[in-house]
Image (cartoon, grey):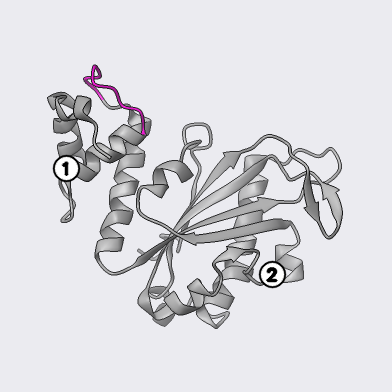
């Protein structure tokens, strides 16, 4: 997808180059495609800080892809409870429990995934909050409403765990442990390209506290 208007906007092109040129895989045409997706206009002379941060993350996942990891887009929705409205902090807690207690042990084949020998085999995962309107959904034969907030996560998976990861693709294929996955309503997993990060992070300005796995405590 080309944007002839942006191709004539030297200010935006120069900003993209300065922002992303440290990458060994910087592609000006791809950067313009990302900028087009974000709705950056020909008459703009500056790129917003929100767009800059998302473009940098998009380039990071493109680099991971070029370096041999395979990218996936994971969507996780949650069960509501009566009229209770969960905060973003609590919804992030739900995802953390699901990711660390359900997803990673099944992907890695061990609950000792935090050990140093497994750390480099873990996916690089960035999980972003998103909103959706209330909708009626069927679960176990009943019509229920999903929690308003849900997560979109982009994962860069190593070749060592790729086969297992692909076994989780589709709807609700990730095994859940009752205690840690009780709040999860649905999961959906597909392979993707780096630009999907821009969709996943579309509410990042509203919910800037996105999650990163593995955490950076020992980096």
Identify residue for label 1: 28
**Residue found 58% across the figure and 49% down from its top:** 151
Give the structural element (helix, strand or loop) at label 1. helix
Q: Is residue 192 left or right of residue 45?
A: right
Identify residue for label 2: 176
Q: Is residue 40 magenta?
A: yes
Q: Identify which residue, 49 or 198, lies in the foreground.
A: 198
Q: Position of residue 21 (x, y in %)?
A: 15, 45
Position of the C terminus, as image quadrant, is bottom left
**Residue found 76% across the figure and 62% down from its top:** 182
In the rendered image, which quarter is residue 34 located in?
A: top left
**Residue found 15% across the figure and 38% down from its top:** 17
Spatial distance from mark 2 to mark 1, Cα to Cα?
42 Å
Q: Identify which residue, 133 or 148, lies in the foreground.
A: 133
Specify start and end residues of the magenta stretch as a single range.
38-46
| Earlier residue among tags 2 and 1 | 1
**Neighbour class for label 1 at 10 Å: few (<14), some, many (≥20)?**
some
């Amino acid at each position: 997808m080309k944007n002839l208007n942006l191709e004539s906007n030297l200010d935006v092109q120069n900003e993209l180059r300065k922002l992303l040129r440290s990458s060994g895989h910087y592609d000006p045409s791809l950067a313009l495609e990302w900028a087009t997706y974000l709705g950056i206009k020909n008459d703009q002379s500056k790129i917003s800080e929100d767009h800059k941060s998302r473009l940098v993350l998009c380039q990071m996942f493109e680099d991971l892809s070029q370096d041999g990891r395979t990218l996936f887009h994971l969507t996780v929705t949650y069960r509501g409870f009566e009229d209770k409205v969960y905060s973003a902090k609590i919804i992030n807690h739900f995802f953390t429990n699901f990711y660390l207690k359900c997803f990673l042990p099944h992907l890695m084949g061990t609950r000792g995934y935090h050990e140093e020998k497994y750390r480099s085999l873990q996916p690089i995962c960035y999980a972003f909050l998103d909103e959706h309107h209330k909708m009626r959904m069927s679960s176990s034969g009943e019509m229920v409403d999903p929690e308003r907030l849900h997560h979109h996560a982009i994962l860069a998976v190593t070749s060592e765990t790729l086969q297992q990861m692909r076994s989780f693709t589709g709807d609700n294929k990730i095994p859940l442990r009752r205690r840690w996955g009780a709040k999860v309503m649905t999961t959906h997993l597909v392979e993707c390209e780096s630009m999907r990060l821009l969709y996943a992070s579309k509410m990042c300005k509203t919910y800037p506290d996105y999650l990163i796995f593995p955490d950076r405590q020992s980096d």
